[in-house]
């Protein structure tokens, strides 16, 4: 039998935050999560607590249940998304398109239902892969934007063309054996590649 792929191994033991305004629902969901081989690191009910708990515990994934109030669940989602570097999955008891639509606006990555308990692990695996892809893409855009800013600064300070500014960044990156994005960040923060202000003005 083949060894599991890295992505499969990464989802074998997760740290899971569960949030729901109903304690009875928390009590039902936690054993299912534990039965999948994961650790429940926090069970939160109050909106004012969930953000701080998420920031402190840094879960791998968060499950937010729809209890008696959809507004309460939506506020829980907002707080977790604001504080967390993990995907949020909504847990609903039956199809609720309006709630799912509102939850998607607040940043959830998926929803699952009680009826799909046997498929929860597959859903979590898919969500984690999509979340990783999203962050890779987001990071790529961020790195590109940072390099563009650094090029613009060098073009202005040294009266260079765009190509010359990029070559300057790349050459310095190679000479000091550091990543291009790190050099770009240093330029934006005020790197020695920049002339002193008096020299630039002189």
Image (tube, helix red, strand yellow):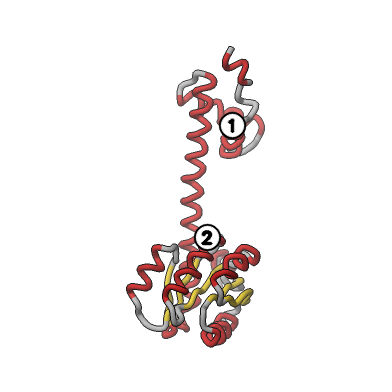
Residue 58, given in percent of the width and then of the height, sits at 62, 64
Quadrant in the rendering for residue 3 = bottom right
In this rendering, the label closer to the viewer, 1 or 2? 2
Q: Quadrant of the C terminus?
A: top right
Q: Residue 165, relative to residue 84: is it above or below?
A: above
Q: Residue at x 57, y 64 (%)?
A: 6
Query: Where in the figure is residue 141, as x and y percent of width and height?
Result: 46, 45
Q: Residue visible at 65% across and 26% down?
A: 192
Nearer the observer, 79 or 157: 79
For residue 193, above or below residue 31: above
Q: Is residue 59 left or right of residue 126?
A: right
Q: Is residue 190 above or below residue 179?
A: above
Count the numbered circles shown: 2
Q: Residues within 10 Å of mark 1 (few under 14, many from 20)?
A: many
Compare marks 1 and 2 and give the one earlier in the sequence. Answer: 2
Can you give x and y, in whole percent of width and height, for residue 94 in the image?
A: 38, 83
Q: Secondary structure at mark 2?
A: helix
Q: Which residue is mark 2?
A: 82
Cβ–Cβ below 8 Å for labels 1 and 2? no
Query: Is residue 4 something that shows in the picture?
Result: no
Residue at image x 56%, y 80%?
33
Q: Quadrant of the N terminus?
A: bottom right
Near-viewer residue (105 or 178): 105
* Residue identified by numbered label 1: 187
* Residue name at image x 49 percent, y 28 percent: 152
Q: Secondary structure beneath disc 1? A: helix
């Amino acid at each position: 039998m083949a060894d599991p792929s890295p992505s499969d191994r990464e989802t074998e033991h997760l740290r899971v935050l569960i949030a729901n305004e109903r304690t009875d629902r928390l009590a039902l969901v936690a054993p299912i999560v534990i039965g999948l081989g994961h650790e429940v690191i926090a069970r939160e009910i109050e909106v004012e607590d969930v953000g701080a708990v998420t920031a402190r515990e840094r879960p791998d994934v968060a499950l937010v249940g729809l209890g008696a109030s959809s507004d309460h669940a939506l506020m829980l989602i907002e707080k977790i998304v604001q504080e967390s570097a993990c995907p949020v999955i909504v847990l609903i008891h039956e199809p609720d398109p309006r709630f799912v639509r509102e939850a998607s606006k607040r940043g959830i990555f998926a929803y699952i239902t009680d009826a799909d308990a046997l498929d929860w692990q597959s859903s979590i695996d898919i969500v984690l892969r999509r979340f990783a892809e999203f962050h890779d893409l987001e990071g790529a855009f961020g790195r590109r934007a940072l390099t563009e800013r650094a090029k613009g600064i060098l073009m202005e300070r040294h009266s260079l063309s765009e190509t010359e500014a990029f070559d300057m960044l790349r050459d310095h990156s190679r000479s000091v054996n550091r990543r291009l994005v790190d050099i770009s960040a240093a330029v934006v923060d005020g790197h020695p590649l920049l002339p002193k202000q008096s020299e630039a003005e002189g």
